[in-house]
Each structure stands twice: as structure tokens, then as C-alpha cells.
Amino acid sequence: MADGDRSAELFARAAKVIPGGVNSPVRAFKSVGGTPYFVERAAGAYVWDVDGNKYIDYVQSYGASIVGHAHPKVVEAVTAAASLGTSFAAPTEREVLLAEAISGRVSGAEMVRLVNSGTEATMSALRVARAATGRDRVVAFAGCYHGHSDGLLASGGSGVATLGLPASAGVTSAAVADTVIARYNLVPALDKRVGAVIVEPVAANMGLVSPQPGFLEGLRAECDRVGALLIFDEVITGFRLAYGGATEFTGVTPDMWCFGKVIGGGLPLAAFAGRRDLMEQLAPVGAVYQAGTLSGNPLATAAGLAVLELLDRQSYSDLADRVRRFAGMVAGAAGPEVQIPVAGPLMGVFFGAETVVDYEGSGRSAASGRYAPMMHGLLERGVAIAPGAYEVMFPSLAHSESDFERTAEAFGVAAAIR
């Protein structure tokens, strides 16, 4: 690999004008050490940094680029849209088309509201849920990330269900007083103070942790028992796990969904969706206010539609089959102390012998200290994964069998680095 002088120079300049030198903490190398590489361009399965290094990229904009970077059809769609104007603050046809596409794929998602980020989607969905139920309390799960709105930045204790405490400076105790944190894969007993349960149907923010048999079904039943709403946060899993998202993948239907990443095709776009009676709580029809000048941006909707048009059911089946084989290759090369969990086309990395089923298990893997040297070892061999032990890998349709073979070989060396 070439040296990183240009990236180091840019990072030094960035640190003077951008807090921490990055515009999102997940881009920092704070937990793994070293200096972030600055990307110059990307195509398909690869990114090139400003120092001329080429990487097989499994970050893929944290899952947004399921068809690979700069897919010709996506670039063409965005270019055509940009030539007509970049923002109008007025309705456009593509907003309707994208909402129809989402609703048509996800059984039960009768209405859709487009927003700009996953944080907006989850925050707004909870506002609707509280209005619809007349209840303030929300149950979330340790290790699941639902954006950086105050009410969802709560951390749980070691109990099965504890009242949340602020997980960020600047978040008041009052902001999270109605947030209850439960243990993932353990169905909490709810009461009639709970308005909503929000969950990642496949947890992808604590490594990759799949729901154990009966967990999501149990949440559905418990919500029904007390009259609470079940919300699937599918900002990562939506239209990545399956053609119809996690509802198709798991067989469980929530009351509301939050989508992001894939539906924006790499541009800033997210959405929340739900039953008609719930979504009609929103202004201008109902009394729940939510707005955004750039919501349904014409460039983002063009990209999102182009991506969804590329993804038929066979695409998901083929990618899942390829990733399953790829995970076996990586596991075989990395050795028995490394686990490579798979859920559809998502992959994770854990260290240790125990199967990880919750945030505590993921934390023990991270505490091993093995992720950072492995990540840097992979970078040195031309493979890029996220700079954090709680992230997942995003193989895309653009990755070739040769990419997978080279990656497995790199894992064989990098996983042994201490």
C-alpha cells in the first residue's frame, strides 16, 4: 500500500475546523487508532483514497450502496434529476413513485412519509406512536441504535429492563425518563404505560445479532396484549435483508417501520411508514407535526428509485447465497476463535467461542481488543471494513468472487494479528 501522507495532512487540517476531524463519529479511528483514510472516489466494490490506495470496500456507506458505488444507472438517474433542479420545496412525481415502491414491497406499510435521515425517521415514528396511543413510555433494547435524538440516546443497566439513563452529554434525564432499556432477545413484560416498542429486527449496531426464535413474535404478542405499537427500525435492514425487508425475512409484521440507507441509493433520504390510521395522525391530515424543507429531495428520490428498480427477488437470493459462501471462506481462513455471523446478505465479526445474542456478548467480543489490529491488518492488505468493533460488513452485488477470495486470504493473516 502507498503511504498515507495526504490523508494525514487532510485529517490534521480537518481537526482544526471540524470537531474530531470528522462529521460523524463512526468515521473516526478513535477506537482503533491511527488516521482515517480520506476517500477520493469509488466504483462498484472499491474505494480509492487520496494517497492512491485501493480497497475492497465492505463499508459501502454503511449499507447504503447495496448495488455498489457509483452504479451507472444510479449515476444516470441522479444526473438527469440534477439537470432539472436540485430542490423545490414542492411535491414531485418521484416522491409518489418512491412511496408507492416502498408500500408495494412491504406488506402492511400502507402509507409512507419521506424524511432526510434515519434519526428523523425514528424520532417521527415515535411521535406518531405516542400520539396514537396517548402513552409516553417507549421500550428500546441495549445495543440497538435508533439515531441521535435525545429520547433515544439512553443506555441500559444490567437488568432485563431498566429505566434509561442519558448516554450522551447534553441529554437531560428528563429527555430519557420515559425510555426503558431491555435486553435484546429477551421479551420484556410490558404494562399499559408503554406506547411503543422500537427494535432492530436484526441488530446491526452491536455487531450482527440475529433475533432468537420467538423473540420478535413475542414482542408482537406482548405489544398486542397491552395495546402498544411495535416499530421496526430498518434503517439498515430495510430492502437489504429481503425484497420486502425484515417483515418478509422474519415473518413478523410491526405497526410501523423506519427505513434509510438503501432507499436513498447513497444520498440523504429515509422514511417512516405504517398503517393508514397511524400515518394519518401526521399533519396536514392530523395533529402530529413533522416537516422538512429537503424531505423527498429530487436527487435522492431519483437515486432510491434507481436502486429499488435494480433489486428484484432474485438479486436478494443470489446475494444471500454468495454471502453465505463468503462467510464460510472467511471463517475457515480466520480460525476457530473468530465468528462470522450471517443474516441474509449481512455479515459480522465476533471474537470468542460463545454465540453472541445480546449487547453484553457483543461487548465481551469488543473488549478482547482484537478488532483494531485485525482491521488495520486488513487495510494493509487492501480490504476496508468499518473502524469499530460494533459495526457489520456490507457485501454488495458489485463484489466479485475474486474479491471474496482475496478478502478471505487477507482475513487469514489479519485475524491472527495481536
Image (cartoon, rainbow, N blue to C red):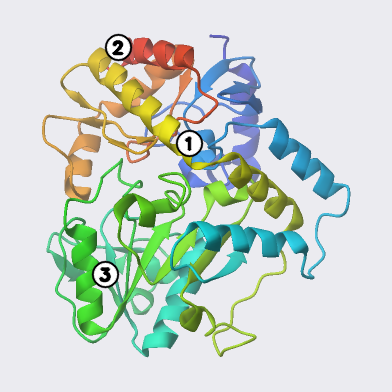
Closest to the observer, 361 or 194: 194
Depicted 341 relative to depicted 18: above or below: above
Whether residue 148 appears in this view of the structure is no
On the image, the x and y values in percent for residue 410 come to 37, 12
Work out whether mark 2 precedes mark 3 in sequence or the reverse, and give the earlier one. 3
Residue drawn at x 56%, y 90% is 287
Q: Which residue is mark 3?
A: 164
Residue drawn at x 30%, y 17% is 329
Q: Which mark is residue 412?
A: 2
Relative to 189, 76 lies left or right: right
Q: What is the quadrant of residue 333 in the picture?
A: top left
Q: Amino acid at mark 2?
A: Gly
In space, the residues marked 3 and 1 are separated at their CA atoms by 42 Å
Which one is closest to the eye, mark 2 or mark 3?
Answer: 2
Q: Which residue is mark 1?
A: 314
Q: Amino acid at mark 1?
A: Gln
On the image, the x and y values in percent for residue 88 come to 82, 65
On the image, the x and y values in percent for residue 10 come to 65, 29
Q: Amino acid at mark 3?
A: Gly
